Amino acid sequence: MTFNGWLQIAVYFAVLTALVIPLGRFMARVFQGERTFLTPVLGPVELLLYRIAGVDETREQHWTTYTVAMLLFNAAGFFLLYALLRLQALLPLNPAEMSAVAPDLAFNTAVSFTSNTNWQNYGGESTLSYLSQMAGLTTQNFVSAATGMALAIALIRGFARQSAATVGNFWVDLVRSTLYVLLPVSIVGALFLVWQGVPQNLGAYVDATTLEGAKQTLSQGPAASQIAIKQLGTNGGGFWNANSSVPYENPTPLSNFVEVLFILVISAALTHTFGRMVKDERQGWALYAAMSVVFLAGVAITYGFEAAGNPHFAALGLDPANMEGKEVRFGIANSSLWAVATTAASNGSVNSMHDSYTPIGGMIPIILMQLGEIIFGGVGSGLYGMFLFVVIAMFVAGLMVGRTPEYLGKKIEAKEVKMAILAVVILPLMILGLMAVATVAPFGLSSIQDPGPHGFSEIMYLYSSSTGNNGSAFAGFTGNTLWYNTTGGLAMLVGRYFVIVPAMAIAGSLVAKKAVPPSAGTFPTHGSLFVSLLVGVILIIGGLTFFPALSLGPIVEHLAMNAGTLY
């Protein structure tokens, strides 16, 4: 570890924190229908979209109607993307003459991008046409992220409103998320990336001759526009196979800084949006603090173990720092920061290969995904996932003091606790259940690259990433098989929508309740005690659930490495 490395991490976190207030305040105004500096330009466009779609923007929806609208919209997006991938050989904007995507891979990819997971069992430059990238993947990058934001806002309204019957209008929230937040920032981000050297064209692939006289094909395409929204919307699907470690996607240290900033900025700012909408900004800062504690701890552990590296290297007279799989342009600090940020969010893009990390360095990204992608999580999904843990934490607090738990004046009763527990247990059921089959069946074991505990970690990473809607992978693992395409797709569906429905049920229950005034027995939810309780509940639930599996993978591999056995 170096002072320069820590300084870069500190600067990153300082900039992220500085952006929380202005962006969070802006989003609060957008979702409350207030005038912003973009309203004169985008207001007429918003109204035109409602007229075209036949949406009455003044009519709000019950939580069940809101949820059904979201599910139908996402189902339509899945089928359209699946059809586009299967038919791409017959469609235009295919200069490299890509063939149709296989049925199981098309299913996996369509589910992946619809659910905001963006897991990729293919190489983008060798599998997808320009039309599939633009009309299929980039479109889903916008609307899947907007879906998560809309759901988070609906749940915030559950806390903010009293004795109400509705949680908003899904179509309005979807349009405003896309039109006022995602689209403007993505346009600026795409232009910035073009300035930094990222391609944005529809040209054919270019053949080049290397200094050795060999032929090399240089892929082209509309990359900058997809990369901007893939980071901002915590999508993460790379235009190229090696993702943001490819110089075309991430050409400079400045582009690296901005891209990793994009990964967390909306998710972080939504905590302030929450504070503004419930009329108590301290509540938003408490959630931000809880997320930050776990995030910074993850960065410190990952950076520490990657900088320490493999002790056997020193015995050979080599630098022990683990540069294997790292991008030498950015170094260990920025690689570790990105690894933690991309798995703390449901992003999944990588600028280094997590499979090459030390056992503990690779374990931290796995844990962050297993916690439910809530530190800081995906845009919207991280916040409503964190609210589930808030409900559980307040239930625990209520047990300790012997009274009905409350949060923001709303009583947390049996229905809310049951729904929160239901949503939280979905992840371990899918991750551990599918792992149990894959680690003993020949069709599961045939995809691993390395034997022993590292191969076990590869399988655990896949299902943690899929169910957590992250999308990153241990490099080297062969995911493009019938088993992993199918079960991975099912894990993504369950991890996304089986969490959303209970979360929306909580929103519907809370919005109908009256807020009770605070009393002497009310547990304060804006101070360090609440932050500590929330972090403790998150870590204890994750630790009790996944510690046995982690012990069989990265922990035993770390112990074996120190004992002289490498995998």
Image (cartoon, rainbow, N blue to C red):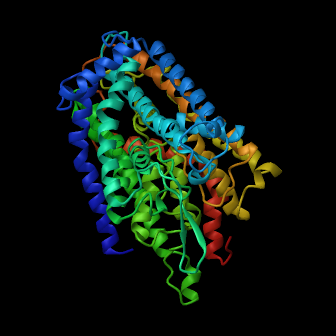
Q: Position of residue 8 (x, y in %)?
A: 31, 65
**130 sits left or right of 58 in the view:** right
Confirm whether residue 422 shows in the render: no
Give the quadrant of residue 490.
top right
Rendered residue at 50%/74% (across/down): 323
Residue farthest to the bottom?
Answer: 317
Q: Position of residue 443 (x, y in %)?
A: 80, 49
Quadrant containing the N terminus is bottom left
Q: Does 173 appear above or below 192? A: above
Confirm whether residue 23 shows in the render: yes
Q: Looking at the image, which is closer to me, 425 or 324?
A: 324
**174 sits left or right of 355 in the view:** left
Question: How many tags in the picture?
Answer: 0
Q: Looking at the image, which is closer to me, 162 or 208?
A: 208
**407 sits left or right of 543 in the view:** left
Q: Looking at the image, which is closer to me, 116 or 280?
A: 116
Q: Looking at the image, which is closer to me, 488 or 543?
A: 488
Q: Does 12 appear above or below 494? A: below
